[in-house]
Amino acid sequence: MRIKRLDILRFIALMLVLARHGEIVPIFSRIGWVGVDLFFVLSGLLISGLLYSEYKRRGTISFRRFFIRRGLKIYPAFYVMVFISFLARRILGTPTPLGPYLREIFFVQNYHIGIWQHTWSLGVEEQFYIFLPIFFLVLLRYSRGQSGPFKGVPKAFVVIAVACFFLRVATIYLTPPARFAASMVSNPTHERMDSLFFGVLLGYLYHFHPTVIQKLLDSRAKQIAMGLLIAALLACSFCNTESRFLLTFGFSSLYLGFGGLLLMTLQIREILPAWLAGPVGKLGAACAFIGTYSYSIYLWHIPFQAFAFGVLRRLFHIQFGEQGRFWFYLIGSIVFGILMATLIEFPVLKLRDRIFPSRPIQPPAAEGDANPALAMTPEASQPG
């Protein structure tokens, strides 16, 4: 069973990214990139949650099974997108050299650009999906016979957070200004893994120490204080994307802010008056519906934008004004992404679940009952 509130967060992250690439609403063109950072924290929480839950159920983790299920979630939809991009560029007479395709195929497009500008984040997440199980395997192996094999997660987060921060600083100050680009800091996994691992830390707290989260938000005063802190942390979204502050402290501030938002989303309930709860609930259901398709929509929104207008212009002689172009891109990306998910992503997932059925999430084993939302089986965010 999916967690509706997390699907709404996926929707928000997706709309931020789509609005940025639509390049018509100034504020979203400026801050929409932070949607990827929200995806990162979500991914860390949900992917680690799958592994934590399997350990609580079985006392171990099947890494082979994890990689197979992750691969069937990610690879079919992604490689179909790459293949269709290849065919479309050949047909339209704009072929791309082999190198960018190889970087996409092997998921290293975050270190050297592939065929599309947005797939770098998929490279970060895919490399993280390899790192995290290996890290957990080390924890399990060297804590055999001990209680709480994941007790090293908080310390590991501190180490990773500090290391990523100083790696970002080093990249900025050691790269000659004439050669420096913000992507040298924003794209490499070794400089952005802290965002994902913060989600892993939150997952650890939810699954093994839920009362820590409950105590943070157990009163209206604490909730208001948390809301103000989140607003302050996320204010760096408005900084210049080339600024040294954003590329160092700013990235850390963003994952802390989005982590706090994620905690509040899962923990706080029934705060709206009855007359408003109904309409907001319906709107939330619509947003959550789109959020369930976020991976395929994210995959296809840039290829759709690149190819659709050319096809309409060449075949049907249709031209759009600025507003029309934006709305056609936004709605078309969502509809086309849902179509491709229906044709490719979801059928593969159904096949996967027949061969390797998901295992139910178990409630936390320590310190009381966790939020019931986390007793469900979530699909991880990639990036959604």
Image (cartoon, helix red, strand yellow):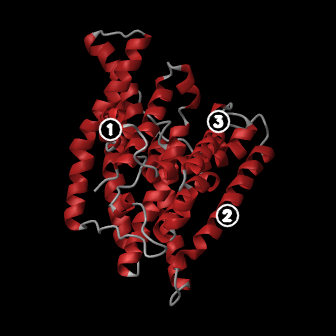
Can residue 175 be seen here?
A: yes
- Spot occupied by residue 368 in the image (x, y as percentages of width and height): 45, 71
Above or below residue 379? Residue 156 is: below
Amino acid bearing label 1 = Gly
Q: Which badge, 1 or 3, is on the more N-terminal residue? A: 3
How far apart marks 2 and 3 lie (CA) works out to 23 Å
* Residue located at (25% from left, 55% from top): 349
Element under disc 2: helix
- Which quadrant would residue 375 be assigned to in this image? bottom left
Q: Which mark is residue 281?
A: 1
Q: Quadrant of the N terminus?
A: bottom left
Element under disc 1: helix
Above or below residue 66? Residue 94 is: above
How far apart marks 2 and 1 lie (CA) works out to 38 Å
Element under disc 3: helix
Q: Which badge, 2 or 3, is on the more N-terminal residue? A: 2
Q: In screen coordinates, is 166 left or right of 369?
A: right
- Depth check, mark 2 against mark 3: the one in front is 3
Q: Which mark is residue 100?
A: none
Q: Which mark is residue 158?
A: 2
Q: Residues within 10 Å of mark 3 (few under 14, many from 20)?
A: some
Say whether marks 1 and 3 touch (CB < 8 Å). no
Location of mark 3 (residue): 235
Amino acid bearing label 3 = Ala
Q: Which badge, 2 or 1, is on the more N-terminal residue? A: 2
Q: Nearer the viewer, residue 239 or 94?
A: 239
Q: Residues within 10 Å of mark 2 (few under 14, many from 20)?
A: some
**Picture mark count:** 3
Q: In screen coordinates, is 158 left or right of 40?
A: right
- Spot occupied by residue 50 in the image (x, y as percentages of width and height): 39, 65
- Depth check, mark 2 against mark 1: the one in front is 1
